[in-house]
Image: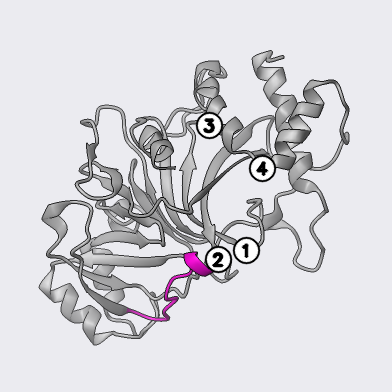
């Protein structure tokens, strides 16, 4: 697994993230940025905008999966990195909590900063902020145990104004963002490149991951790899046409880490076997809570992606 991570951490067009359903740190590189530097500990990279590092690779499992878009004839590709649930679980604190000086920061120059867990009670990640700002540190200590964004949390508006680092800690490592928080100072837009999302509505669902992600029972996500889109540029601008080169860039990675049942389905489809036709594409995160999710939806999604790939690429 270490070799897989080193290969793709060094790939400039590939994105990464660590987090949960509603609290996430994302690491990407922008055109024109200096090359990322390799971390002096673990397996990781960083730029002036953010970084990601794996401190554990033993026992980590990769799961590649695809899903067609519900709004167009496009599809998404992801690779989740998983650990058994018992090994992936984090402290799951509620309310601000001081962890201490972050001696394990990715960059040596950040190892004197103080780390605070935002206390979002997420099973698979500690979503933290990190700072050396004395006033902010004092305010965070005064608000120990208070919920992020609560009306009586006087540290929250100061945090939004001072833009501390955000750090996602999982059982596999960490992802760090050094850029501004998307808020009043940024017209409520996340900056391009590494950024964070903290979405209360999604957090309220209490999930470690989207219901669309086919993670097997007994496992939890500790990191995600995001292949570059063959349909859009890194800033989201649509490409003039589908990029077969970008699609092919990840072919071997996806094939190596798909679930066995998806591999078997794709092999059967390649031999000419027909699957289910006209099955709906289900966005499970928008599915009514009082209705059970359709059985077998992940395999139907895999079939739809296989069909779209052949249409766009002419692959045999």
Q: Name the quadrant of the C terminus.
A: top right
The secondary element bearing badge 1 is classed as: loop
Q: Which residue is mark 1?
A: 218
Local packing at callout 1 (Cα closer than 10 Å; few below 14, some 14-19, many 20+) is: few
Residue 30 in the image: state x and y as whole percent.
31, 33
Q: 219 and 77: which one is in front?
A: 219
Q: Which residue is mark 4?
A: 259
- Tell me which corner region of the image, top left, top right, bottom left or bottom right, holds residue 182: bottom left
Look at the numbered discs 3 and 4 and tell me whether their residues touch, using CB distance below 8 Å: no
Look at the numbered discs 3 and 2 and tell me whether their residues touch, using CB distance below 8 Å: no
> What secondary structure predominates along the stretch shown in magenta?
loop
Residue 238, magenta (yes or no) = no
Look at the numbered discs 1 and 2 and tell me whether their residues touch, using CB distance below 8 Å: yes
Residue 51 in the image: state x and y as whole percent.
29, 47
Sequence-wise, the earlier of marks 4 and 1 is 1
Q: Is residue 261 visible?
A: yes
Sequence-wise, the earlier of marks 3 and 2 is 2
Magenta region? 86-96
- Tell me which corner region of the image, top left, top right, bottom left or bottom right, holds residue 23: bottom left
Dot label at residue 253: 3
């Amino acid at each position: 697994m270490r070799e897989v991570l080193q290969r793709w951490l060094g790939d400039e067009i590939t994105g990464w993230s660590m987090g949960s359903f509603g609290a996430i740190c994302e690491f990407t590189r922008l055109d024109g940025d200096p090359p990322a530097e390799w971390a002096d500990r673990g397996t990781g990279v960083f730029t002036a905008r953010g970084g990601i590092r794996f401190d554990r690779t033993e026992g980590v499992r990769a799961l590649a999966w695809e899903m067609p878009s519900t709004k167009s004839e496009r599809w998404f590709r992801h690779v989740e990195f998983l650990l058994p649930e018992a090994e992936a679980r984090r402290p799951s604190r509620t309310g601000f909590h001081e962890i201490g000086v972050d001696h394990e920061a990715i960059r040596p120059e950040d190892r004197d900063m103080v780390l605070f867990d935002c206390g979002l009670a997420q099973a698979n990640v500690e979503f933290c902020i990190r700072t050396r700002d004395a006033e902010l540190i004092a305010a965070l200590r005064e608000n120990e145990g208070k919920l992020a964004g609560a009306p009586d949390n006087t540290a929250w508006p100061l945090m939004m104004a001072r833009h501390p680092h955000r750090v996602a800690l999982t059982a596999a490592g960490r992802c760090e963002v050094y850029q501004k928080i998307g808020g009043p100072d940024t017209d409520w837009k996340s900056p391009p490149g590494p950024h964070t999302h903290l979405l209360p509505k999604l957090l309220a669902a209490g999930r470690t991951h989207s219901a669309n992600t086919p993670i097997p029972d007994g496992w939890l996500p500790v990191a995600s790899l995001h292949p570059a889109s063959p349909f859009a540029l890194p800033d989201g601008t649509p490409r003039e046409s589908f990029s077969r080169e970008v699609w092919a860039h990840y072919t071997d990675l996806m094939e190596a880490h798909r679930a066995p049942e998806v591999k078997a389905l794709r092999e059967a489809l390649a031999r000419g076997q027909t699957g289910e036709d006209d099955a709906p594409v289900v966005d499970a995160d928008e599915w009514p809570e009082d209705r059970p999710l359709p059985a077998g939806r992940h395999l139907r999604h895999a079939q739809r992606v296989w069909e779209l790939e052949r249409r766009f690429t002419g692959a045999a």
